[in-house]
């Protein structure tokens, strides 16, 4: 179709936004024209104007328009895709409850605004942390939008896991399929290579090194964000933007027949994850809909890891319920 896809990005003047907007405008979602609708808080609008000047200066053939503002009911009007990147980072001395309530205010308002004005076919991807719980808050506050339209980003973790496995085995990332991230986008996440394949062979059998899996692979993937902050002096932004594009593209356009991706989506009780939690699963997508991959055998080791991360999600849900956010 040549009607532009209307894509909202929140936190558009931030670090991730600075990579994301240029990827979206240069065709990361496909060759359909796009219109960008950029939301920021008032104090960041001036910086955002500068970013828009740079977007203009790229003369992107696919970019049919850009609108900016601080009012979600204006910016989300008619959007087909909303990428919720802006979130309140944890400041010095901030307790977890403070973080959850600061983000609760943002994501209740945005969920309500999306409910009111987004297009009927809207899909909503949450990148801003704590991503799973922010998505849960937005989903619960968007009463008329089907729950299946919300997801939180675990694609960066998924990509990190593929990269680590490729490095370990000398394989190309192109040969790796069926990686899975389970649970929360946090340090408790469980990157699972037991169902992954390298050129059609079971990855765990190719690696054949449980100590590496437990002592290197899992912690390296889970703590990669901190390692990047250490090295770069700033959090990962380009890779988070890249993963946000990958996730949106695959959601809208579908996954290949012999592969799946990781997305945090509302649980239907699959794999013992309590119904209603937004937890990462292996999913396939087609025509803008996702399905949790069924029937995977879960070892005792994997069970423990999944349960620990899901328990953290249940705690976060209890905390935001107590705060009256959902
Ligand atoms: P970034 O663009 O670096 O990060 C934005 C969000 O993405 C944060 O919650 C961050 O979580 C999360 N994130 C960062 N890295 C990753 C990763 N590797 N994987 C997954 N998620 C990740 O932050 P900035 O501070 O540069 O920009 C945020 C912008 O959002 C600011 O311009 C601010 O004004 C804006 N904002 C807009 C709002 C709105 O539109 N209403 C509301 C709130 C903020 P973490 O903190 O854990 O790194």
Image (cartoon, rainbow, N blue to C red):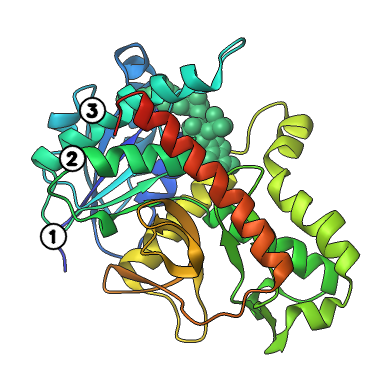
Horizontal side of 301 relative to 181 (left or right) equals right
What residue is drawn where x is 39% and y is 37%? 134
The residue wearing badge 3 is: 109
Q: What residue is disc 1 on?
A: 3
Residue 313 on image: x %, y % = 50, 44
85 and 310: which is toward the camera: 310
CA–CA distance between discs 2 and 1? 21 Å
Sooner in the amino-acid sequence: mark 2 or mark 1: 1
**For this view, does 229 lie left or right of residue 53?**
right
Q: Nearer the viewer, residue 59 or 233?
A: 233
Rounded to the nearest angstrom, the CA distance separating label 1 from label 3 is 28 Å
Residue 113 coordinates in the image, percent (x, y): 16, 34
Which residue bears the numbered disc 2? 114
Number of other residues with Cα within 10 Å of mark 3, as a class: few under 14, some 14 to 19, many 20 or more: some
Is 78 left or right of 28, judged from the image as shown? left
Badge 1: residue crowd in 10 Å (few <14, some 14–19, many ≥20): few
Whether ligand 1 has any atom under 8 Å from the Cβ at mark 3 is answered as: yes
Could you classify mark 2 by the number of other residues whose Cα lies within 10 Å: few (under 14), some (14-19), or many (20 or more)? many
Is residue 11 visible in this depiction of the protein? no
């Amino acid at each position: 179709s040549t009607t532009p896809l209307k894509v909202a990005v929140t936190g558009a003047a931030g670090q991730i936004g600075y990579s994301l907007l240029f990827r979206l405008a240069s065709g990361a979602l496909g060759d359909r024209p796009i219109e960008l609708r950029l939301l920021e808080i008032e104090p960041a609008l001036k910086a955002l104007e500068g970013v828009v000047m740079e977007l203009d200066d790229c003369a992107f053939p696919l970019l049919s328009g850009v609108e900016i503002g601080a009012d979600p009911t204006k910016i989300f009007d008619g959007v087909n895709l909303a990428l919720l990147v802006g979130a309140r980072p944890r400041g010095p001395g901030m307790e977890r409850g403070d973080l959850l309530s600061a983000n609760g205010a943002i994501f209740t308002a945005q969920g309500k605004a999306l409910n009111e004005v987004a297009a009927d076919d809207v899909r909503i991807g949450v990148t801003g942390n704590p991503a799973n719980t922010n998505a849960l808050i937005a989903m619960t506050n968007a009463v008329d939008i089907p729950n299946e339209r919300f997801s939180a980003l675990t694609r960066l973790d998924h990509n990190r896991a593929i990269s680590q496995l490729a490095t370990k085995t000398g394989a190309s990332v192109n040969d790796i399929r069926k990686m899975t991230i389970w649970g929360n986008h946090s340090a408790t996440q469980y990157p699972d290579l037991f169902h992954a394949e390298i050129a059609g062979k079971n990855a765990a059998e190719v690696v054949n090194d449980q100590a590496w899996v437990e002592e290197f692979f899992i912690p390296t993937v889970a703590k990669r964000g901190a390692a990047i902050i250490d090295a770069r002096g700033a959090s990962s932004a380009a890779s988070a933007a890249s993963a946000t594009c990958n996730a949106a593209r695959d959601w809208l356009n579908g996954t290949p027949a012999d592969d799946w991706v990781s997305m945090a989506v509302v649980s239907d009780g699959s794999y013992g994850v309590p119904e209603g939690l937004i937890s990462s699963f292996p999913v396939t997508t087609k025509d803008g809909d996702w399905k949790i991959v069924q029937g995977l055998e879960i070892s005792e080791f994997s069970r423990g890891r999944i349960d620990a991360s899901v328990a953290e999600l249940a705690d976060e849900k209890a905390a935001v319920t107590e705060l009256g956010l959902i």
